[in-house]
Image (cartoon, grey):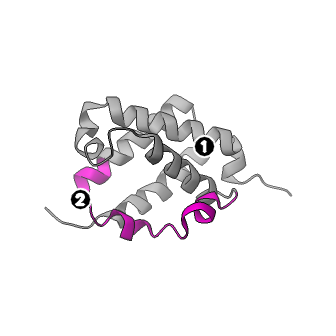
Amino acid sequence: MNEKTLFEQLGGEAGIRELAVIFYRVMDELPEAKPIRLMHPKDLTSSTEKLALFLIGWLGGPPLYEQKYGHPRLRARHLPFKIGKEERDQWILCMVQAFDEKKISEPIRSEILYSLLNLANHMQNYLP
């Protein structure tokens, strides 16, 4: 049996790039996400590209992020930012809304969001 990767199920590179665009648009527009939005540059183009490249490889596609930037070292790259439970929850809220808008269905919706929640938990670097 030849099962499709999550990368393929989300529409490949184009589908994941679209998800990253939606994610950052949601972050930019959602009042509840203002604290994490302020951690990002005014122009979200680079952030959107980096998220897309990371997700493409993380979800089973080609390792485009690693080819361009090296190992993601996500925790190290996020250490300059104060990330606690509230920031984690804001990030996840934006991703859930992006999944809603992109109409990502079960069972891959829960599978990916669960994995992203674990990843977001790992990014936390302070306790209020």
Sequence-wise, which precedes: disc 2 or disc 1? 1
What quarter of the picture does the C terminus occupy? bottom left
Mark 2: few/some/many CA within 10 Å (<14, 14-19, 20+): some
Label 2 residue SS? loop
What quarter of the picture does the N terminus occupy? bottom right
The structure residue drawn at horizontal position 26% and vertical position 67%, both measured from the top left corner, is 125
Drawn side of residue 126 relative to residue 121, left or right: left
Label 1 residue SS? helix
Residue 93 visible in rendering: yes
Q: In this view, does 2 lie above or below 33?
A: below
Identify the amino acid type marked 1. Ile
Q: Picture coordinates of residue 11 (x, y %)? A: 69, 40
Give the numbered dot on residue 84: 2
Q: Picture coordinates of residue 85 (x, y %)? A: 25, 56
The magenta stretch spans residue 53: no
Q: Name the residue under label 1.
A: 16
Identify the amino acid type marked 2. Gly
The structure residue drawn at horizontal position 25% and vertical position 36%, both measured from the top left corner, is 32
Q: What stretch is highlighted in magenta?
A: 62-89
Q: Picture coordinates of residue 54 (x, y %)? A: 55, 56
Drawn side of residue 14 relative to residue 4, left or right: left
The structure residue drawn at horizontal position 35% and vertical position 47%, both measured from the top left corner, is 91
Q: Picture coordinates of residue 107 (x, y %)? A: 61, 46
Front-lying residue, 94 or 48? 48
Give the numbered dot on residue 37: none
Q: Distance between the residues labelled 2 and 1?
A: 26 Å
The structure residue drawn at horizontal position 64% and vertical position 58%, both measured from the top left corner, is 64
Q: In which quarter of the image is residue 84?
A: bottom left
Mark 1: few/some/many CA within 10 Å (<14, 14-19, 20+): many
